[in-house]
Amino acid sequence: MEFNERPELNERDKALKYVSRLLDKASKDPKGNQKDINELLEVQKLINQKKYGLVWEEHAEKVDKEMETKIPVFIEDKNKRIDNGESKKINFILEGDNLHSLYLLEKTHNHKIDVIYIDPPYNTENEGFTYNDKKVDKNDGYRHSKWISFMQRRLVVAKKLLSRDGIIFISIDDNEYQNLKLLMDEIFGEEKFVTNFIWRRKTGASDAKGIATITEYVLCYCNNPNKKEWNSIFKQNEQSYDEKRYRYKDKYYNERGPFYYDNLDRGGLNYSDSMNFGVKAPDGSIVYPNGRTSFVNDGWIWKWGKDKIKWGFENGFLEFQQSNKKANGWALKYKNYLNVDNSGKLKVRSAPFKNLITSVINQAGTNELKGMFENKTPFSNPKPVELIQFLVSLCNKKDARILDFFAGSGTTGQAVLNLNNKDGGNRTFILATNNENGIAENITYKRLKKLSEGYTTSRKISEIIFQKKLTISSLKNMNVTLDKIEKVIKKNNGKYQKIVKKISDNTIQVIGEYSKGTLMPQIQFNMRYYKTDFVRRDSGNLEMDLLRNVKKLIELGNEMSIKDLHAAIVSRQSEVKKLNLRGIKRVYMRGRVHIMMSPDEKNRYYLSGVQIIDVPESLFGEELQGWI
């Protein structure tokens, strides 16, 4: 039977048809009440009214309907294993339709993913996108609604995968930006919108008509709606602070750095008599907040209490300065040091990153792939590694789980590995992609395989290792910036064949370069390659069919092998007694086998400290409902 992708009926359509039937019945009834008819007409009008938000005609999708009769499972291609042993954590490539992969990830990674980055099809007029194995082009009247339906199904699952503080980044351009923003507000919540990154993807477009568009966007949402916590969820820019303010030095310079002065008294704070007291000045006079010479409740207080003021004088954090602006002739000031807080504890000055990205252009992505694939371009318009690396680095977790379910050429995987190399992180990635035109096997996998083995570059490769926007403030304090640059160069000395400095778009950059023919060093990581397969729901032995695929899901969910997990799988009653529990911490056991365990068998597992986890109930419980 030919698949019908016409718009699906939705709740609004059903409600309208129901009201229409009631109206038809009421109008034909000779005793019909006109008041009822008028009220039904009003209900019909209200249903038809345009509501705020995104409204589209939902379309059926083959891969979605397919799961009504078949259950996706993973099989491993063991020939594509990458084992380096330095880390027990495993990364994954999932080959197949990403909706099937998301279906299984919902079982293994519910609320476990820290960062999602996706670069979905942009649905441009010329390129369109593939929907139900057909190209959707500009002549398709349902072009936009099909794209929204396609994205909505995947983003609903994506939300379930994000951890409490999880972050999602989505690349997009003008074609679907407005639809994606409304869709994201609907699924994730408008209160979780963080920002819209503006990425300058190229510097010019001389062949443009009217106005040259040189930007794209990256929408960013945080699953935690509490904005007060965002500064700890997102990494802060440690190179972004007002250096010119820290212009004074004292005897503590080597440990505390430079400082600036600030007044210790404040008005408008929560008033308290206990914070309104006299402090002895160098001339023996007693000074009060707001330049007073006596106690008056005028709303002004000291920022510090008596004990801390005593500590401040003893440790060089406080200083009296003569002032003709104060009635008492003195200003009590505290020192804001660059490298410590006002309790003397080490502090790194920082500020939030900005939502404008100008340091990397799209061509860099193509050059990177050419450098790995014999100067050929196996994938059109790949995103630059530097772009994804920057986005992933904004998550303030060095052990973050990263998911890309439009993985394409595998840029996200390389970005994660590069970032780990750069800052010593232990992040892991999951890349889901189809194998259309051999993308998964011949590009995504081969790219990561080359990184694990080392490869010879077929063209020059560049990497930004330091950059700073030039401002009036930074120019006045250029010696500080130059010191940082020298430290970066010293740290990376020997890593690159050449390190160059340049100024581009009012930004000073330090770039590490590998020339053509350079043998790139290996990156140590572990990876598994899974392919989507299916189990029929009408299978006569559904439970055992699903159990055969449990191992892959357990390893995927824990990012470790069964061996490294100190775990075992028990599917049959005979295996309960035979299993050697030495070194075993947990056993994934078939539910009915667990129920049939004798008291002695249960006691043996209990005394050995073994945790029993029911399978497939823990992974395939919904699929088995009503089967047994």
Image (spheres, grey):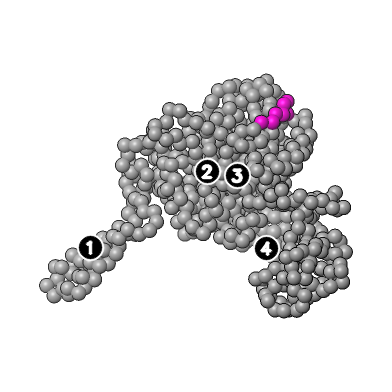
How far across and down, in percent of the image, does residue 279 sit? 82, 72
Quadrant containing the N terminus in the rendered view:
top left
Say which residue label 4 marks: 598
Q: Find numbered disc 2 in the image and state the secondary structure of the residue it sits on.
A: strand
Residue type at mark 4 is Ser
Query: Given contact means CB atoms under 8 Å apart, are the residues at marks 2 and 3 in contact?
Result: no
Residue 454 seen anywhere in this rendered image of the structure = no
Position above or below: 92 against 605 = above
| Foreground label between 4 and 3 | 3
Say which residue label 1 marks: 20
Q: Nearer the viewer, residue 179 or 68?
A: 179
Residue type at mark 3 is Leu
Position above or below: 470 against 304 = above
Q: Find numbered disc 3 in the image and state the secondary structure of the residue it sits on.
A: helix
Q: CA distance from mark 4 to mark 2?
A: 63 Å
Query: Given contact means CB atoms under 8 Å apart, are the residues at marks 4 and 3 in contact?
Result: no
Q: Find numbered disc 4 in the image and state the secondary structure of the residue it sits on.
A: loop
The residue sitting at 70% across, 73% down in the picture is 300
Crowdedness of circle 4 by 10 Å Cα count: few (<14), some, many (20+)? Answer: few
Q: CA distance from mark 4 to mark 3?
A: 53 Å
Say which residue label 2 marks: 198
Q: Nearer the viewer, residue 162 or 3?
A: 162
Residue type at mark 1 is Ser
Label at residue 106 = none
Magenta highlight on residue 156: no
